[in-house]
Amino acid sequence: MQHKGELIEKVVRESGYSITRLAKKMGKSRRWVYQIFERPNVPMEYILELGKVLHHDFSKEIKGLKEYKKGGDFQKWEDPEGEFFTDQEKAEYWKNKYLMLLEKYNELLTD
């Protein structure tokens, strides 16, 4: 299995971008950045956001990112310890998921 955190750390270190500056640009803490480095599974949204900040296309290193960007699918909910997502982000995720399912349901009713 691909350890996404290690791949991200490698790119960050090679870019010369400081951890403090990266955290500030992301609106997160330095500890949050180090937690990303330690995680084998990092949510695709964060990988995309990190790529924008670092001006790096992670789709070369991270399998499935290209398809994720094209499909616009919702990520698999992977945050067992609650370390990556705030309560507001969790609520937003479930709201979007509900709306997506409701749209699909309505399409089935009209067919």
Image (cartoon, grey):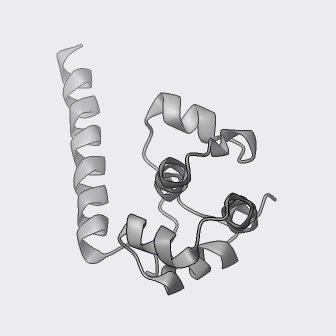
- Which residue lies most toward the front here? 16
In-image side of 2 versus 67 (left or right): right
Q: Is residue 81 visible to the viewer in this orientation of the structure?
A: no
- Of 58 and 20, the residue lying toward us: 20
Residue 100 position in % (x across, y down): 28, 39
Above or below 34: residue 91: above
Q: How many marks are shown on the rendered structure?
A: 0
Indicate the quadrant containing the N terminus: top left, top right, bottom left or bottom right.
bottom right
Quadrant of the image containing the C terminus: top left
Can you say whether 48 is above or below 13 in the image? above
The quarter of the picture where residue 105 lies is top left
User: Is 37 positioned to the left or the right of 104 in the image?
Assistant: right
Give me the residue at 54% from left, 38% from top: 68
**27 and 63: which is toward the camera:** 27
Classify residue 74 as left or right of residue 34.
left
Residue 87 versus residue 31 in the image, above or below: above
